[in-house]
Image (tube, rainbow, N blue to C red):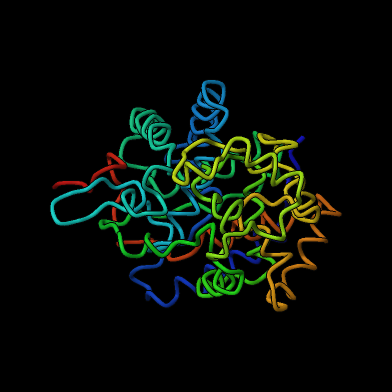
Amino acid sequence: MATSIGTAPLAVALCALLALTAVGGARAWTPMSPSYYDYSCPSVHDTVRRVIQEARVANPRAPASLLRLHFHDCFVNGCDGSVLLDNAGAMQSEKNAPPNNGSARGFDVVDTIKAALENACPGVVSCADILALAAEISVELSGGPSWNVVLGRRDGTTANFDGASELPGPRDAVGLLRQKFSDLGLDDTDFVALQGAHTIGRAQCRLFNDRLYNISGTMQPDQTLDMAYLNELRQCCPASEPESTTLRNLDPPTPDAFDNSFYANIVRNRGLLQSDQGMLSAPGGAAATTAPIVVRFAGSQDDFFQSFATAMIKMGNIGSLTGSLGEIRRNCRVVNRG
């Protein structure tokens, strides 16, 4: 059953939101609130939930895909829906940047949500808010925590291909990952909690093949990998196919359930991605600040859920456009024309 997260993380987020939006000046600032659409589009939450429920039945990967889209949106240009834009003229889509190309998905579900909302309340709900709502609902439907999603974002009018190319990656060292999160105002607890999104979803062999055979060019496997798990992974990800797109569950014990099993795997040296295992096992003491958090979350699902909800609210407020900034796209894939 989903755990409802109450007012504490919301209060933290609203304080952060005031600080972030005040920089843009009074013209740009409009209060964001969980009740933002209560009068203009009261069916928004039910509509998003219905579409995701249907998508989840057709494809169990849908919740993880939608959650990932929200991450990849907020980490580039802020939470402005830019990850959804297609190529247009000289503008390169973020979808084609290496971290997204061939792996980001869920765009069709967003299109379905947007079409339904445009039918119910045209020109009202932004694509950026759809991503934020879809992320929360995806977590909740997967058994994770729920939280009050602060709404009122507007959509950006340009993509940032170069920025998307620098998204946190599966081979990034823990120090680099911590810095990327810190640059966006997210602390170590936020970082470790948000990595917990990997409790649902899959990863392609090509993203961790080097850990199985040639970590850091050593022609050896990653010594932090549990030996039995290493042999298991080698069975489906052979050395002869380093670019294989074969999928492996990020959290094998409960691949579609949002829980703290992900952290228990790491404690057992069974983190699938180098970026995940590194939070506990990075060499040279690099994991000194993150390892205790991993162990804490492994021991307390409630602690993980509370921290995850807080971090998601904070992340969802990064660079939000409000007031007269941006637009409300009619089609999430393209900027409005006139």
Residue at 59% over, 40% down: 201
Number of callouts = 0
Viewport quadrant of the N terminus: top right
Residue 288 percent across, percent down from the top left: 75, 75
> x, y percentage for residue 26?
38, 73
Q: Position of residue 283 (x, y in %)?
A: 69, 73
Residue at 75% x, 37% y is: 253
Query: Which one is nearer the viewer's eye here, 40 or 241?
Result: 241
**Residue lying furthest right:** 299
Residue 222 vertical placement versus 29 (above, below): above
User: With 89 as the anchor, is 259 left or right in this view?
Assistant: right
Q: Residue at x 54, y 57 (%)?
A: 170
Nearer-the-camera pick, 4 or 282: 282
Task: Locate residue 13: give its quadrant.
Answer: bottom right
Find residue 127 and report its horizontal and vertical position in percent. 38, 45
Asked if residue 293 lies left or right of residue 206, the reply is right
**In this picture, is 262 found above or below 236?**
below
